[in-house]
Every structure is written in structure tokens, then in C-alpha cells.
Amino acid sequence: MTLDELKIRMKIPLGDTTQDEYLKSALEDAIEYVETYCNHSFKDGLPGGVKKAIVLLVKASGENSNVASQSLDGMSKTFFQGQIQAEAHDYLKPYRKVRFR
């Protein structure tokens, strides 16, 4: 997954480079996490479900995990600890490989 693809999936204009260094780092971390979690290197490319999980993990890494809810101009958002990671894991279930030791 490229930085440009991540930005498109996150609805960040490609011309906006203000977050590129952070996004590159978060993308690398998310891909490493997914490969470890799934016991899979995805050498033939990342399937759509895996890409969705990576986007969720990148978004989650930028949110304050100490906040239970937020309100702004009459709109509110409630966070459940581990909610985003659980959703990412749901996308990854079909791609997990069992590893025997």
C-alpha cells in the first residue's frame, strides 16, 4: 500500500503533504502489525479487506485513546476502548494463517 493510496482511502487530498511523515510512519507500523497478526507477508499484494484494516489502524493511531467521548458544535462521538482495533481484526479474520510451533 502506498502513501497515496492511504491518503485516498482516508480522504486526504494528495496535494496536502503536511501529514506525510506521520502517515508514512503510521502506515509502516500498521502494515507490520497486520503482517504479524495475520502470520502472512502478503507478497502478492494486499487484499481490500486488509487495506481497510490498515486504514482503520492508521486512523486509530492518530486519535487520543484517553478520550471516551468528544463533542463539537452539537455533534458528538463516543469511543469504546479497543473498538477500532476489534473492527480491524474483523476485516483481517479471513486472512489469518495458523502458525504451528
Image (cartoon, rainbow, N blue to C red):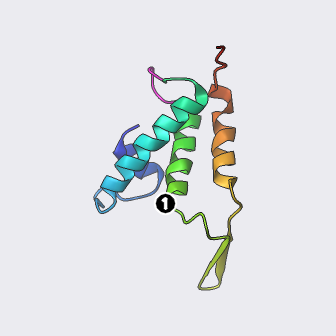
Which amino acid lies under the numbered mark 1 shown in the image of this protein? Gly
Left or right of residue 100, residue 16 in this image? left
**Residue at point 59% right, 32% down?**
37
**Residue at point 47% right, 54% down?**
10
Seen from the viewer's position, the closer of residues 12 and 96 is 96
Location of residue 77 (image quadrant): bottom right
Q: Is residue 65 above or below residue 20?
A: below
The image shows residue 73 at horizontal and vertical percentages of 59, 85
Chief secondary structure of the magenta portion:
loop
**Residue at point 53% right, 63% down?**
63
Quadrant in which the N terminus is drawn? top left
Location of residue 98 (image quadrant): top right
Crowdedness of circle 1 by 10 Å Cα count: few (<14), some, many (20+)?
A: few
Left or right of residue 65, residue 2 in this image? left
Range of magenta residues: 42-47
The image shows residue 72 at horizontal and vertical percentages of 59, 82
Quadrant in which the C terminus is drawn? top right
**Residue at point 45% right, 26% down?**
45
Location of residue 52 (image quadrant): top right
Q: Is residue 7 above or below residue 19?
A: above
The image shows residue 19 at horizontal and vertical percentages of 34, 60
The image shows residue 54 at horizontal and vertical percentages of 52, 43
* Residue with the most extreme bottom position: 73
Left or right of residue 34, residue 11 in this image? left
Seen from the viewer's position, the closer of residues 9 and 68 is 68
* Residue with the most extreme front position: 101
Q: Which residue is mark 1?
A: 62
Residue 71 belongs to the span the image colors magenta: no
Instruction: Say which element carries label 1.
Output: loop
